[in-house]
Amino acid sequence: MRGSKYTAEIYLRRLSRFCEFVRISPEALVELKQEELDALAQDAVTELEKQKYLPSYIGGLSTSTASWLDQNHRHIEVDVKITDAGVAVNAEEEEVPEPAQIEESIAASTLRGKASASLICYTGVRPGVLGNVDGTDGLVLGDLPDLDIESLKFKQIPFVVQVRRKLSKKRHNYFTMGNEIPANHIIAYLSERRGQHEQLSAQSPVIRANLLHKERALKSLNRGPCPAFVCAANVEEEIRRGIRRAGYSWRPYILRSYFDTKMLEAEMANEIAHPVVIFFMGHKGDIERTYTLNKGKLPDTLMRQIRIRYSVASTFLTGEAQDRERLEQVKQEAQQSTRQEIESRYEERIKSLEYRIAVQEKMEDIAIEEDVQGHTGRPRLISSIDKIREYSRHLEDQTKEREGD
């Protein structure tokens, strides 16, 4: 059967834990009589609940064990109920941090950890985007189109983060955006790597594995060549260490929840549209369909509006939105930038239009003048054209004089 390699590895680990708990091998589990199998499943859940294991943990073990039995044409025929099944106890008790706490946890991490944590926190990407489950793929510098690799500078902020289909949980291409905080951490991290004589290119990982440790691990497992990508588990572990050093007990995934929550606050304040938030989170929706149909490209006007909206919404991520004066300033700057861009783009066209109107008005004056002088019917063409040319040269001279001033 075909399926996710990541899911298969999780199921294998859970099956191993279940068999260790009930002290039976996977092969012996399959050979049990139906009555023994049903009784074992019920007793295991009862004992796990007595030992205060979370409902989600017990459910994971049960699902993985049922999958193993199904592969061997065996089934648990009794209905084994798990108390509070489907309730995420940890998530219910977990509170979304404040901006200042987020800053503390990021500051307590390593240089690489700061880049990873800030990307998740301020762009909303999953840890598996930075590096997949087995460290064979991940976000590369080429996925940051606004980054100038040679000078290690971002051409514009907010910057775009392109998530390829293979890195997306929903298996579709999408993009999100980041502000100056992840931009600064990424530049600092890449500068350190360049200082260690690494040749950076569009194919270089944004978050790079510790190759010495990874090569040893792969060698012990008799694996092939060592890719430079970090594993998702290592991304989370490094972020977790920074969070613990800062004195907090959150899960690393709380950083993505923080992004989602702050974008929701911005949406409630009418600073960003719901479809944009859905798109940034990597979920399917209206913008995702447009992005897919246009083969990974949105109209320039829409992209500019998304950048402006993210610029305003990111003040909720940084805590600046609490200062309403600052929020209004950002909005005014964004609107002014848009007006200046429009005026610059149509400046030449406006001049040309004014020129044509002026010439047309002169033509009408000439026609009236010639009729008044006694000509009947249409004005004489040759004399009219000569006068128009003369007036056109006069307009051009005036334009040059104004530009010279």
Image (cartoon, grey):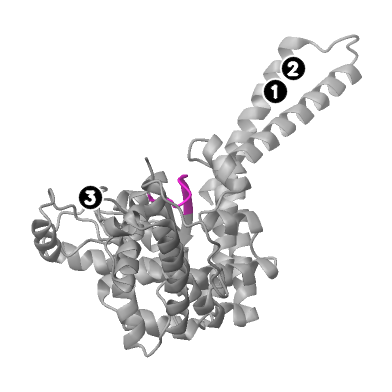
Label 1 crowd (10 A; few <14 / some 14-19 / many >=20): some
Q: Nearer the viewer, mark 3 or mark 1?
A: 3
The label number, if any, that marks residue 388 in the structure image: 1
What's the residue type where badge 1 is placed? Ile
Q: Is residue 372 left or right of residue 152?
A: right
Whether residue 252 is in magenta: the answer is no
Quadrant of the image occupied by residue 250: bottom left
Q: Position of residue 359 (x, y in %)?
A: 72, 29
The amino acid type of the residue labelled 3 equals Ser
**Segment tinted magenta in the rendering:** 167-175
Q: Are marks 3 and 1 in contact (CB under 8 Å)?
A: no
Helix, strand or loop at mark 3: loop
Mark-to-mark CA distance, 2 and 3 = 64 Å
How many numbered circles does the render carry?
A: 3
Q: Nearer the viewer, residue 335 or 79?
A: 79
Q: Secondary structure at mark 2?
A: helix
Read off the residue under disc 3: 201
Residue at image point 47% right, 63% down: 124
Q: SS for tag 1?
A: helix
Would you identify the image quadrant in which residue 380 lies?
top right
Up-down relation of residue 206 to residue 297 (above or below): below
- The CA distance from mark 3 to mark 1 is 59 Å
Distance in Å between CA atoms under marks 1 and 2: 6 Å
Q: Disc 2 or disc 3, which is closer to the eye? A: 3
- Please report contact status of discs 2 and 3: CB closer than 8 Å, yes or no: no
* Viewer-side residue, 401 vs 131: 131
Q: Nearer the viewer, residue 48 or 191?
A: 48
**Where does label 2 land, which residue?**
384
Mark 2 or mark 3, which has the lower sequence index? 3
